[in-house]
Image (cartoon, rainbow, N blue to C red):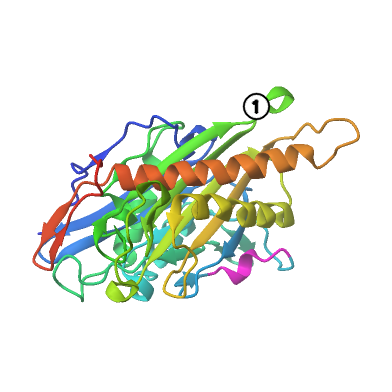
């Protein structure tokens, strides 16, 4: 039987975690061994959270991202699923939807609710040894249930866990993984938290390395991020925050947003706190929030690389990035 152990992950977080944003919970599930090396990470926000997305990669695998456009009917998001398995793994989002429906979370319609669960996938097919083993609805349900079981503010497991289980960087040369970080704004907005959850499966490598890049043909790649805040934002403001947060991805990885990447950033705003803007500068607080979003994305990506130890499977070896745990 495949393992669901999180022994290769760690739940310490020197730069904080996305769960430092009140109301945000994270659940993860994975399969390791017997040909498996993949998983699902779910960000579960409180009811009423609004969402947006900005997709920059040239090879995205996504689900329900059109529903997050500021011009569409539904503004709220019930969960975000980050999954392995490339386009096949998007089936895991249906399991997250099932959990949400069973718990009454979703857009009200006659007869019930329709859960809004956007999702995005990384390419990890075959890295465990069997190309046919990828996340399904059952694994998505497991990750959603795990998120709901977390207490508020609980730490987030990092490294080779969830959607980062089969992640790699450097076009499939080194191990990637799940990372997280958080920050608070300053002054009158010290009550505003911003956090990020990243799944790092990039064509690129960290800028700080100064290393030559492996051939880009070695693998298909994606970095997925959820940015969350307790600030009150409109959907359009959340969209602009996702756009600004991509700067953090570009500061962390080289190259980024390539034709072979599916780089995607979701923004969740719980609308629990109002931003306080200085007199005469109504956008200043929003700019500060968006700057913080870019920084926590950068830190979460580097964290995901640093916390991912190397693995060996029947498909070969993925060593940890130099200096990783």
* Count of numbered labels shown in the rendering: 1
Q: Quadrant of the C terminus?
A: top left
- Determine if the magenta segment contains residue 65: yes
Picture residue at 59% right of the left edge, 61% below the top:
53
Q: Residue at x 41, y 67 (%)?
A: 94
Q: Can residue 103 be seen?
A: yes
Q: Residue at x 21, y 46 (%)?
A: 309
Q: Is residue 146 in sight in this rendering? A: no
What residue sits 44% from the left and 36% below the top?
Answer: 17
> Would residue 28 appear left or right of 183 to someone viewing this image?
left
Residue 277 vs residue 97, the one in the foreground: 277
| Residue 147 placement (x, y as % from top left) | 39, 45
Quadrant assignment, res 110: bottom right
Local packing at callout 1 (Cα closer than 10 Å; few below 14, some 14-19, many 20+) is: some
Where disc 1 sits, the SS reads: loop
Q: Position of residue 104 (x, y in %)?
A: 52, 53
Q: Which residues are drawn in magenta?
A: 64-70
Q: Which of 180 and 294 is in front in this view?
A: 294
Q: Does the magenta stretch include residue 27?
A: no
Q: State whether residue 154 is above or below residue 35.
A: above
Residue 267 locus on image (x, y percent):
59, 52
Q: Which residue is at the front of the view, 172 or 153?
A: 172
- Picture quarter with the N terminus: bottom left
Percent coordinates x, y for residue 12 in the rendering: 33, 31
Q: Mark 1 points at which residue?
A: 191
Left or right: 314, with 309 as reference point: left
Towards the viewer: 73 or 17: 17
Position of 102 compared to 129: left or right?
Answer: right
Most extreme residue toward the right is 280
């Amino acid at each position: 039987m495949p393992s669901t152990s999180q022994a290769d992950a760690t739940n310490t977080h020197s730069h904080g975690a996305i769960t430092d944003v009140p109301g945000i919970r994270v659940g993860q599930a994975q399969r390791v061994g017997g040909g498996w090396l993949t998983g699902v990470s779910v960000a579960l926000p409180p009811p009423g959270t609004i969402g947006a997305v900005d997709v920059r990669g040239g090879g995205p695998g996504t689900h329900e991202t059109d529903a997050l456009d500021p011009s569409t009917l539904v503004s709220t998001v019930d969960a975000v699923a980050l999954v392995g398995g490339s386009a096949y793994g998007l089936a895991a989002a249906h399991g997250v939807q099932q959990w949400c429906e069973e718990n009454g979370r979703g857009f009200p319609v006659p007869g019930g609710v329709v859960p809004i669960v956007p999702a995005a996938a990384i390419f990890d097919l075959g890295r465990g040894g069997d190309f046919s083993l990828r996340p399904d609805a059952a694994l998505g349900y497991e990750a959603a249930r795990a998120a709901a079981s977390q207490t508020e503010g609980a730490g987030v497991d990092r490294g080779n866990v969830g959607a980062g289980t089969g992640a790699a960087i450097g076009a499939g040369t080194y191990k990637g993984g799940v990372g997280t970080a958080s920050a608070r704004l300053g002054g009158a907005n010290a009550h505003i938290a911003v956090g990020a959850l990243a799944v790092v499966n990039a064509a690129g490598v960290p800028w700080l390395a100064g290393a030559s890049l492996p051939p880009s043909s070695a693998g298909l790649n994606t970095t997925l991020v959820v940015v969350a805040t307790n600030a009150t934002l409109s959907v359009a403001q959340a969209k602009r925050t996702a756009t600004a947060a991509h700067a953090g991805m570009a500061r962390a990885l080289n190259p980024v947003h390539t034709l072979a990447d599916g780089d995607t950033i979701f923004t969740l705003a719980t609308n629990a706190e109002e931003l306080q803007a200085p007199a005469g500068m109504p956008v200043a607080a929003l700019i500060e929030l968006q700057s913080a979003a870019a920084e926590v994305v950068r830190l979460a990506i580097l964290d995901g690389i640093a916390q991912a130890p190397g693995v060996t499977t029947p498909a070969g070896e993925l060593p940890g990035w130099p200096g990783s745990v």
